[in-house]
Image (spheres, coloured by chain):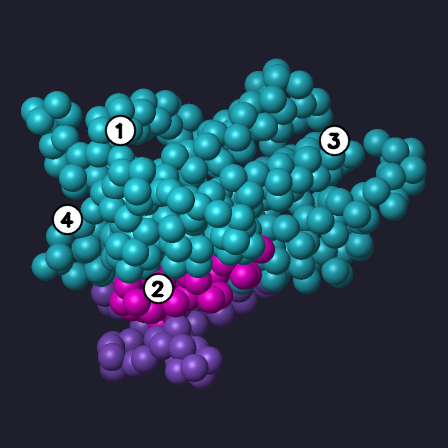
Amino acid sequence: MIYVFAVTLIYTFVKKKEELLEEKRNLVLFMLLSVIGISLGIIYMINPYLPSLTLMLEKYMK
Amino acid sequence: MNREVTLRQTAFMYLFISLSPILRQIPNAVASEAGRSGYLSPLWSLVPIFLLTAILIAVIKTFPGLNIYEIMVQLIGKFFAKLIIFLYLLWILLSIVSKINIYALTIQFTLMPQTRSNYFMIILILLVYFALNRGAKTVFRFSEFTLGPILFLFAVLFLCALTRLRTDYLLPVSTINIPSTIFASKDVIAVGGNIIVILFFADKFGITITKSQIRKLWGGVLVFVILSFVITIFTFGITGADFTASASFPFYMTVKSISFFNIFERFEVLVTLFCVLSDFIAICIMAFLVLRCFEWIFNLKQGKIIAVPLTVLIFYLTYYISSTQFEFNFLYRTIIVNVNLIFQYVIPALLGFLCLIKRKKIQKQF
């Protein structure tokens, strides 16, 4: 799935290049969200059995 | 006047997005908190939900044609408005992620236990993408047209179930149970607080709001309370409070035992369908709100340009938040309900209070 998302992100970037490059803020936001999303995806791909945040909270609260 | 969205449509949307928590979470939560008398909890929730609605109407009337961000800018300044909107953004992100999670879990639990949740999530994301491409009005219209038939089907379902209702599962209830039922009503209040969504769309209602539209909103709130009360009473009356407290989707189990004059049965598929539709609309609305929050915080001209990276982020966040039904139940009961109360009641109440203090100054402006 991460490959599909990566290709979609590149496609969107190319398609909306003018709007994104129009203002620095747009580009920074787009890149920041893309990097966070892809990083989460890579971590999930490497280890899909990572404990969820709820599980950690549950352990911490008990 | 041709408005983008009307208050009446928002009332329908509010009822529609509340449908899945009413069917899935409320009976289970009130049974766990208040036991056999838990079905009385939705009645207590009427007071805070009506109060919240009154505050929201007062705020909208004081600031006609402005949305929550613009209202906050007027009341507390740009910096604090952005800060609170950022907190709202985090809350909506948490809600959308948990909604996607429970949507996938519901389909897995009821219809397709062998299929992986990724599949449901990808289909959902595609559907949300197509729905949002058509604009928010399409989503509102969909809930407006679909809610009527759903409520009618519920009425038929309840008529069929009347004979199966066991009074010994519901009675006796004594005054000792009142404190626990009041405490358990927070689970209903946390769902009923979804009415806050109207503040995010308040700029689309136009400058004037008619009395009939306000009546529709009050009606929507009243229907919400009645619907949650009736569904809880039927779940308790047919399956019993103990089973309702332990099952993850008690209303689904309840409907399994209902048949239409022993001719038609297996209505539980309809319950799954209603939940899925309600989740779909809720996710569409939340996605729209997330984009609006980004527009307000970062002064974006068009929030749509960040839709794809945001989708990727939300998709993977779903795996990190919770992965099983037990985890979701814990997340919902301990985190989501309490956080909902803050964002749906505490912040709007503060806004209402500020409105009251600055009323004279505001009246000169508008």
Mark 4 = which residue? B111
Q: Which residue is mark 2?
A: B328
Q: Tell me whether marks 4 and 3 sit on the same chain.
A: yes
The reply to whether discs 1 and 2 touch (Cβ–Cβ < 8 Å) is no
Are discs 1 and 2 both within one chain?
yes
Q: Identify the residue position indicated by label 1 in the image.
A: B162
Q: Residue at x 40, y 44 (%)?
A: B172
The image shows residue B273 at horizontal and vertical percentages of 24, 39
Q: On the rendered structure, is B99 left or right of B356?
A: left
If you read the primary sequence from the N terminus, does the residue marked by circle 4 or circle 3 appear first?
3
Report crowding for label 1: few under 14, some 14 to 19, many 20 or more residues within 10 A (C-alpha): few
Q: CA distance from mark 1 to mark 2?
A: 32 Å
* Image coords of residue B259 (percent x, y): 14, 30
Q: Amino acid at mark 2?
A: Phe
Which chain did the renderer colour cyan? Answer: B
Q: Secondary structure at mark 4?
A: loop
Residue occupying the point 67% across, 54% down: B346
Q: Name above or below for residue B9 compared with residue A33.
A: above
In the picture of the structure, the residue carrying the numbered disc 3 is B61
| Label 2 Cα crowd, 10 Å radius (few <14 / some 14-19 / many 20+) | many
- The chain carrying label 1 is B
Magenta stretch: dominant SS?
helix
* Amino acid type of the residue tagged 3 in the rendering: Lys
Foreground residue, B91 or B188? B188
Report whether residue B183 is seen.
yes
